[in-house]
Structures are given as structure tokens and as C-alpha cells.
Amino acid sequence: MVILDCEQYSEEWFKARAGIPTASNFDKIVTTKGEPSKSAKNYLYQLAGEMITGVKTETYQNAIMQRGLEMEAEAKDLFRFALGEVKEVGLIYPDEQKKCACSPDGLLEDAGLEIKCPLIHTQVSYLLSNKLPTDYIQQVQGSMLVTGFKKWFFMSYYPGLPPLILEIHRDDAFIEKLKTELDSFVFELVQITHQLKEMAA
């Protein structure tokens, strides 16, 4: 595990992510059933373009997403009060090859943390279901693939409502399927990047 200590959403952070598949986008590579995603090709071409230009594609951020980022610090303080100290990190690679990465909202001694600050109706639905939302299965399990951790904490937070804090355990069967698809994706990404470089030469 290789940790890049930088501020998330900084210029250094965006540059480090350019052209690299990251856990928050693993749903574009594999479905929750471990099958190839229909979004893989577009994501592949996006990363190939980023690899050549060295520039991270601008990501759309609406007012709701911005609000979530602003509330994340408040949620993290609440998590610290409940479960202890959380270390801030920028980006984590599995090894020096840096073929993929994840950007957890924090690290504990033997686990990572993912925080979401959804709209009020979504928080209520999360509380009632009391399980990891389907939308984040690939991200959470993918983060465990990248880091090697056996567990990950998922927290969703909305002011005035109870927080949802779940301890998610590593799903080795799913992670094996994810790893297979990710390895294939990265191999194809390298091939396309070489092809683009030859065209530009």
C-alpha cells in the first residue's frame, strides 16, 4: 500500500488520479454481480485520454454534491467521537505500480472510512434499510481491494437525523471478480495508451 499525502481535490490530487481507475468509479468497470459494466468502454477511453494529456477530466459538481463535501467534516467529527481517530489521506495505491487507487475519507488502524452526506429522504431510506447502499458496493469493496484491508466503515449523515455507521467486511468472492475485470481493464488501457502515443509520434 502506497499512500500519497495531499489534500483531496487539490491540483496534486487531481494530477495523481489522471489516467488511473479509482474505486469511486469501479462501478463503471464491474456490476454489483461482478460482471463487466456497460460503462467500461467510455471510462476506458476517458482514462486513456487523461493518460496522454496528463489532465484529469473535469467532473460535474452540483450544489447538492458541494453541500455534501461541506458537511463531510462535520460527519467525520461525529465518527471520531463514536469510534476514534481518523487519519486524513489523499490517495492510496496498492503498490508502486500505481495501476489503480482509492481516496478514502479517512483511515483507521486496520480499516478505511467512506462518508456520504445524502439528501434527507435518502438518509431516511438508508437508515431504514440499515445496510450498505447498492450504489457504493463497488467503491467500498474496491477500496478494500486497493488497500488490502478486511473491513471498511460506511457512514451516511444528515444533520438532525441519526447517522448510519456500518462496518462492512471484505467480500473475497466479489473482490476476486472485481480484480479479474480490473486487471483486464488496466491491460487494455495500457494497450490503447501505447496506440495513441504511436499515433501522436
Image (cartoon, rainbow, N blue to C red):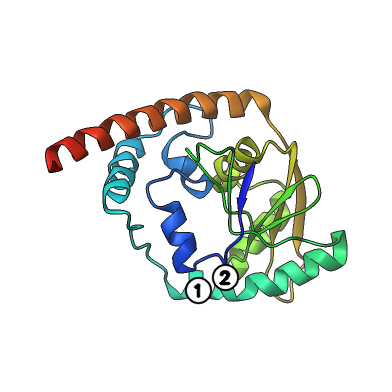
Badge 2 is on which residue? Answer: 68
The quarter of the picture where the C terminus appears is top left
Q: Amino acid at mark 2?
A: Gly
Q: Nearer the viewer, residue 103 or 197?
A: 197
Q: Is residue 41 left or right of residue 37?
A: left
Percent x, y of residue 142? 58, 39
- The residue depicted at 62 percent of the width and 69 percent of the height is 120
Quadrant of image for the N terminus: top right
Mark 2 → mark 1, Cα distance in angstroms: 5 Å
* Whether residue 29 is situated above or below residue 50 in the rendered picture: above
**The one of 176 and 6 positioned closer to us in this rendering:** 6
Instruction: Give the x, y percent position of residue 78.
Output: 79, 69
x, y (%) of residue 42? Answer: 29, 42
What secondary structure is marked by label 2?
helix
Q: Amino acid at mark 1?
A: Gln
**Which residue is found at the position 57% from the left and 70% from the top?**
68
What residue lies at 64% left-to-right and 70% top-to-bottom? 72
